[in-house]
Structure formats: structure tokens, C-alpha cells
Amino acid sequence: MANVKLKHPYSVRFYLGNEIAPKGYAWIFPKTDDIAEVGIGVRGAVAKEYLDRFVKEHQDELGNAKVIDYRGAPVPIGGLISQAVQDNLILVGDAAGTVIPFTGAGIHSSLAAGLVAGEVAADSVNRGDQSASFLSAFYERYRNPWGERIAKSLKAMRLFERLSDDDLNSLAEALSANDVLDIANGLDVVKVAKKLMSHPRLALKVGMALLQISST
Ligand SMILES: Cc1cc2nc3c(=O)[nH]c(=O)nc-3n(C[C@H](O)[C@H](O)[C@H](O)COP(=O)(O)OP(=O)(O)OC[C@H]3O[C@@H](n4cnc5c(N)ncnc54)[C@H](O)[C@@H]3O)c2cc1C
């Protein structure tokens, strides 16, 4: 959108809540002083309806803004598919589910998958073997750290998608911005779980479950 009047023109902002974006989030990413990407990701709901409502509710910032470009697409957030490798073929990117499920961010993790796939493909040419069995080295090389991060992020997402807005508000008070990034990206889940273990309500509901995620 162009001609935006952002209250926070130098920070990327995310908006969470079942009323705002069911099982997802809305965002405002400033690009210049008066241009920003305004978007939304939802599940089980019509994205455009929620996006229109979001824009309406941010009249003060977006009221006089104009849409200058738009796009939308499904983002696969079910984790790495089980058959990304076949004879003569390695799938990467959205086609293979190399997306961090909780955030729906697939650029970095897909570039990393492309790099690993390229290395495995080069080895396969040198060895003259393009069988699925040889190309399966992709899974081993991609697992650490990306495959593991995707798997942990998926489990954390499944846990958090069941939380009410009240729970999310309590979490926002209990956690720091870095804690949220750690959980969403499948990084230091244990640290966050330990922090929540002292919380009267979230210890049982979230802390214990996070500890289980990190131990599997
Ligand atoms: C609205 C939205 C916002 C997003 N925001 C972020 C974000 O902020 N950060 C982040 O990390 N991820 C984000 N993502 C996810 C990210 O864009 C994808 O995970 C990532 O682009 C996947 O890369 P890819 O190469 O697999 O697929 P793509 O980037 O979709 O590339 C596939 C390419 O193949 C082309 N193509 C398709 N069919 C054919 C055909 N038959 N012949 C030739 N070419 C073809 C397409 O035109 C496209 O250029 C967002 C996704 C959406 C939809």
C-alpha cells in the first residue's frame, strides 16, 4: 500500500488473535516512509475478509493508503513431505514443504534446501548414481539444523493453535520477543519451556508440552 501513515515506520509489526487472523497473523512491513506491505495469513477462514477488516480497523494508519500491488498464495505449513526425493528428483521449497510452519516463512529454509539439493545432485553426477537411495542423502544433510527446526516449529504450532486469546495475552506478558522467535522458529524451545514452568496457568498448558516437544 502507498501513502500509509505508520505509527511505527521503522519496525515490522505482527498482529495476533483469533479475531484478527484465525490460526495465523496479520502484518505490516514498512518498505519506505510511505509504502508498506500489509498482509495476512489465516487457516480455515477467508483471508481477504480478514485483511479488509484489518485495514478498516487501522484507518488512522491505512485510511488514505492505496493498494498498488497485490498477491496471495497458499503456503504449505505441514512440514517436510515424506517423499521429497525420488529417482532423478529432489524437491525443495514450497513443493517439498521446506517452510517454517509456525511463521509460514519459507524463503531462508528453502534456499538452504536448494543449496543442499545442489550439493547432493553434484555428488550424484560425479558418482553416476541418480537413484532415490543415493539422493536420499538430501534428508540427512538437510536435517541439521533445518529439518529439525521445521519439525519442532510444526509441533509448537499445533500446541499454540489451541490457545485462546486470553492464553496468548498471558504468554505475551510472560515471554520476551526473543522467546517468541525461539519457539516459532523451532530454536531454543527448552529455554522457553523452563521459563513458563513457573507460570501458574501456562506451566501445565504450555510449558510441559514444550518440554515434550524438545525431547522428541
Ligand atoms: C503472501 C505471502 C507472503 C509471504 N511472506 C513471506 C515472508 O515474509 N518470509 C518468508 O520467508 N516467506 C514468506 N512467504 C513464503 C515464501 O514466499 C515461500 O515459502 C517461498 O517463496 C517458496 O519458494 P519456492 O521457490 O518454493 O516457490 P516460489 O517462490 O513460489 O517459486 C516458484 C516459481 O515457479 C514458477 N512456476 C510455477 N509453475 C511453473 C511452471 N509450470 N513453469 C515454470 N515456472 C513455474 C512460479 O511462477 C514461481 O516463480 C510468503 C508467502 C506468501 C504467499
Image (cartoon, rainbow, N blue to C red):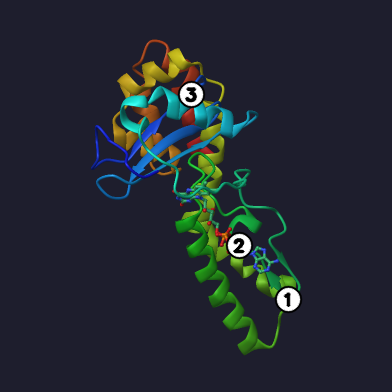
Is label 2 in a helix, a strand or a loop? Answer: helix
Contact between marks 3 and 2 (CB within 8 A): the answer is: no
- Label 3 amino acid? Ile
Which badge, 3 or 2, comes first in the chain's sequence? 3
Frontmost of labels 3 and 2 is 3
For the residues labelled 1 and 2, the Cα–Cα distance comes to 15 Å
Q: Are marks 1 and 2 in contact (CB under 8 Å)?
A: no
Find disc 3 in the rendering and name its residue.
Answer: 20
Which residue matches tag 2?
139
Q: Separation of disc 3 and disc 2 at Cα?
A: 37 Å
Please name which of the two marks, 1 or 3, marks the residue nearer to the observer. Answer: 3
In the rendered structure, which amino acid carries the disc numbered 2?
Tyr
Q: What crowding class fits label 3: few (fewer than 14 Cα within 10 Å), some (14-19), or many (20 or more)?
A: some
- The residue under the point 49% across, 17% down is 205
Which residue does the numbered mark 1 point to in the structure image? Answer: 88
Question: Residue at coordinates 54% horizontally, 62% vertically from top-left?
Answer: 142
Q: Position of residue 178 (x, y in %)?
A: 30, 37
Mark 1 nearby-residue class (10 Å; few <14, some 14–19, many ≥20) = few
- Pointer 1 residue Cβ closer than 8 Å to ligand 1: no
For label 3, the SS is: loop
Of marks 1 and 3, which one's residue comes earlier in the chain?
3
